[in-house]
Image: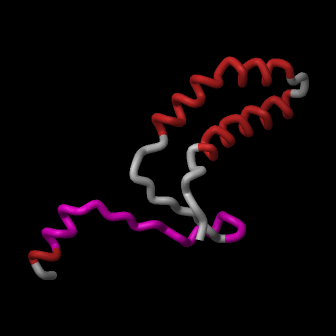
Amino acid sequence: MNDRIQAWKDSTWQIHPTLRMPTFDPEAVQVAVLDSDPIEDYRKSLKQNRERFRREIGEEKDSTQRELLKRAQITGTWDRLFNGVTGV
């Protein structure tokens, strides 16, 4: 390989998504490339909503429903951070 090309590859950020996911049905992976890391906003949002989330979970009597509610809260918080990602 040309030395200039190798030097360029070594100095740039690259992404190599794996699109074959045999454990998914259907085999599909959604990818979004963002210009910022959403983790910090995710943590802030969870912290801001912590008391409300705990109250809602505490009001639920059924343990299965509590677990489903907790997952929905976490997933919903994450999904709201991607409202600026448009589909094709």
Using the rendered view, name the quadrant where residue 26 is placed.
Answer: bottom right
The image quadrant where one finds the C terminus is: bottom right
Give the x, y percent position of residue 35: 39, 52
Give the x, y percent position of residue 25: 71, 67
Using the rendered view, name the quadrant where residue 67 is placed.
Answer: top right
Q: Does the magenta stretch include residue 88?
A: no
The image quadrant where one finds the N terminus is: bottom left
Residue that sits furthest to the left in the current view: 3
What colouring does the structure picture have?
secondary structure
Give the x, y percent position of residue 22: 63, 69
Q: Is residue 33 left or right of residue 28?
A: left
Q: In this view, does 10 lie above or below 49?
A: below
Taken as a whole, is the magenta stretch helix, strand or loop? Answer: loop
Disc tally is 0
Residue at figure coordinates x 13%, y 69% from the top left: 7
Give the x, y percent position of residue 42: 54, 36
What residue span does the magenta drawing correspond to?
6-26
Residue at figure coordinates x 12%, y 81% from the top left: 2
Q: In this view, does 70 lie to the left or right of 84?
A: right
Residue at figure coordinates x 85%, y 28% from the top left: 63
Residue at figure coordinates x 57%, y 30% from the top left: 45
Of residues 82 and 64, the one drawn nearer to the viewer in this rendering: 82
Q: In this view, does 27 lie above or below 42?
A: below
Q: In this view, does 3 lie to the left or right of 70?
A: left
Residue that sits furthest to the right in the current view: 61
Of residues 43 and 84, the one drawn nearer to the viewer in this rendering: 84
Q: Is residue 20 above or below residue 69?
A: below
